[in-house]
């Protein structure tokens, strides 16, 4: 791990409000949770750096060193995924244009947008807490939907998050009971900033035929 404590991670300032179906109260509470991930990421990083300075890496089985190293993946993953989530929310974000680069890439990947949407909705509604994420494979340029547990579990290595939905209950519990998660998913999809999502796509030049090796 790099030495980061001299440049602690700073929480980003998201101006998200007026989301139809996700209250400002929920957003403010949720931003507070995000700031907690930033705080914990910095705290874990500083403690791990202390180990390095004291030469404790010579004892990798030290329980605290091992536990904190594992925890860093959880805290850092939670921090970054929340930034993607708030970064792809915008009041009345518009509709996904099938002729846009994003729309075309989804159709290239799933055959049509309806199929992609059904899959993304189904993943978002899965039991348990986690994230529904549409990723792009930088090797092929193609998109795929995934369920991520606990921020760091299930992440397809090297894939880039393109559209991120927080399906933890804290994301909607002030507005809907747990059984009404589909209403939250509907609200999320009504307020996606599609231009922000599209800007996350890798450059077209990077798209390669499936299976081609580097
Ligand atoms: Fe969250």
Image (cartoon, rainbow, N blue to C red):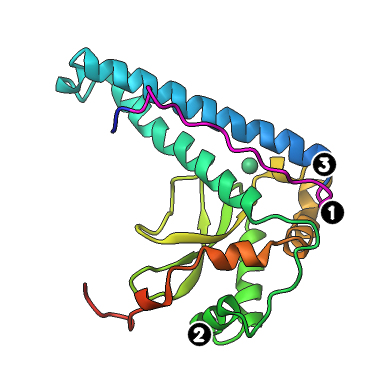
Label at residue 108: 2
Do labels 2 and 3 touch, CB within 8 Å?
no
Would you say the beta carbon of the disc 2 residue lies within 8 angstroms of ligand 1?
Answer: no
Query: Is 71 positioned to the left or the right of 63 in the image?
Result: right
Q: Residue 12 magenta-drawn?
A: yes
Which quadrant, please, contains the N terminus?
top left
Q: Quadrant of ligand 1?
A: top right
Query: Which residue is denoted by mark 3 in the rendering?
Result: 24
Task: Specify whether residue 205 is in view.
Answer: yes
Q: Looking at the image, tell me whether mark 2 or mark 3 is earlier in sequence order.
A: 3
Magenta portion: prevailing SS class: loop
Secondary-structure class at tag 2: helix
Residue 132 left/right relative to 109: right
**Element under disc 1:** loop
Residue 166 screen position, x and y as percent: 63, 50
Q: Position of residue 103 (x, y in %)?
A: 60, 79
Q: Would the CB of label 1 be found within 8 Å of ligand 1?
A: no
Pick the front one: 71 or 86: 86
- Local crowd at mark 2 within 10 Å, few (<14), some, or many (≥20)? some
| Residue 182 versus residue 14 in the image, above or below | below
Residue 152 x, y percent position in the rendering: 44, 45
Which one is in front, 113 or 93?
93
Q: Which region is colored magenta?
A: 4-22
Graded by Cα atoms within 10 Å as few (under 14), some (14 to 19) or many (20 or more), the crowding at tag 1 reads some
- Residue at 52% x, 40% y is 78
> Would you name the residue on which mark 1 appears?
21
């Amino acid at each position: 791990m790099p030495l980061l404590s001299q440049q602690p991670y700073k929480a980003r300032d998201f101006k998200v409000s007026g989301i139809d179906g996700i209250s400002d109260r929920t957003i403010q509470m949720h931003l507070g949770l995000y700031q907690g991930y930033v705080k914990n990421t910095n705290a874990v990083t500083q403690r791990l750096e202390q180990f390095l300075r004291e030469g404790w890496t010579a004892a990798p089985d030290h329980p605290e060193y091992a536990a904190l190293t594992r925890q860093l993946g959880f805290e850092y993953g939670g921090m970054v995924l929340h930034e993607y989530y708030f970064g792809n929310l915008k009041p009345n974000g518009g509709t996904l244009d099938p002729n846009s680069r994003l729309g075309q890439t989804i159709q290239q990947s799933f055959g049509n947008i309806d199929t992609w949407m059904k899959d993304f909705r189904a993943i978002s509604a899965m039991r348990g807490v986690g994230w529904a994420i549409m990723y792009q494979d930088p090797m092929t340029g193609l998109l795929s939907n995934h369920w991520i547990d606990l921020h760091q579990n299930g992440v397809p290595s090297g894939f880039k998050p393109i559209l991120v939905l927080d399906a933890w209950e804290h994301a909607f519990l002030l507005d809907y009971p747990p059984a009404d998660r589909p209403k939250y998913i509907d609200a999320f999809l009504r307020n996606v900033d599609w231009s922000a999502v599209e800007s996350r796509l890798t450059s077209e030049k990077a798209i390669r035929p499936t299976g081609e090796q580097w």
